[in-house]
Image (tube, rainbow, N blue to C red):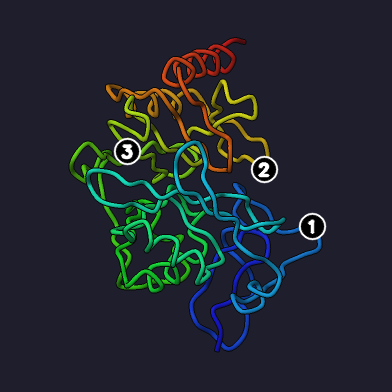
Amino acid sequence: MQHHLCDTCGTQFALSDAPPRACPICQDDRQYVGWSGQHWTTHEALSTRFKLRIGEDDGLPAFAVAGSFAIPQRVLLLPTEAGNILWESLSLVTDEAVAALRDRGGVDRIVISHPHFYSSMVQWSEALGGVPILLHHNDRAWVQRPARCIEHWQGDRLSLGAGVTLVRTGGHFPGSTALHWATGPRGGGALFVGDSPQVASNRRSVSFLYSSPNFVPLGPREVMAMRERLAGLAYDDVYGYSWGRNIIGGAQAAVEASFDRHLQIMTTA
């Protein structure tokens, strides 16, 4: 019996004798099945192929799989006034990373932006003492390894207390989530995003995509709704989903300009 991992998206599945017939996350048109077909691995096998990069990303403790595996997201530890929050998840869990998190005061909860980053979230929770995992209720069908530690929140905003708010941005997935930290690590407020919106490679703008790997943009209605849900939040910085892909300083103006640009392009015949 194994918790099989999809080799393309890195999602961990429920315990089974044999790998699933297919990965529904990769079969969905927001993702893709690997060019050589569906392949599977296990956490034990993954740990022999890769290690975790442990360091700092623009002032925050950061973790990522070192090398090319699945989607290259990185995890951040947010030492907020509402507790220590692990933002996003990875497929690989290591003793070294768990020890590094404990040395920084541990983790009170895990929050994940959308299903592409669910990865080995339950194994992370177990390694950290069974801490709760917060996911949006609208994306509950995408959970491939159900567990009691998973809590599904509902609505467009959820206050975690002391200036930390989860925002359902929607767009990429119905439950796509951003996290707003009123002070942020630098004092001017920070927004943490996955793919809705997504920080661009130039680190001066964001994009609004239904599918990032398949280059499918979001329509104006979804983008306007996202803008409304983010309205009223102040922030100087935006932290994207991969290492170094952040907008540090002037981020709110950059996001607003990106909204304007996208809507102008999408509504001009």
Residue drawn at x 56%, y 84% is: 2
Asked whether the beta carbons under mark 1 and mark 3 sit within 8 Å of each other, the answer is no
Q: Which residue is mark 3?
A: 167
Which residue sits furthest right?
Answer: 36
**Mark 1 belongs to which amino acid?**
Trp
Image-based side of 173 in relation to 201, left or right: left
Residue 252, how many percent across, how many down?
A: 41, 20
Residue drawn at x 43%, y 47% is: 113
Q: Secondary structure at mark 3?
A: strand
Viewer-side residue, 62 vs 143: 62
Sequence-wise, the earlier of marks 1 and 3 is 1
**Mark 2 belongs to which amino acid?**
Pro
- Above or below, 32 relative to 60: below
Q: Secondary structure at mark 2?
A: loop
Residue drawn at x 58%, y 35% is: 245
Q: Which residue is mark 2?
A: 213
Rounded to the nearest angstrom, the CA distance separating label 2 from label 1 is 13 Å
Q: Quadrant of residue 201?
A: top right
Q: Residues within 10 Å of mark 2 (few under 14, many from 20)?
A: few
Give me the disc on residue 132: none
Rounded to the nearest angstrom, the CA distance separating label 2 from label 3 is 24 Å
Q: Quadrant of the C terminus?
A: top right
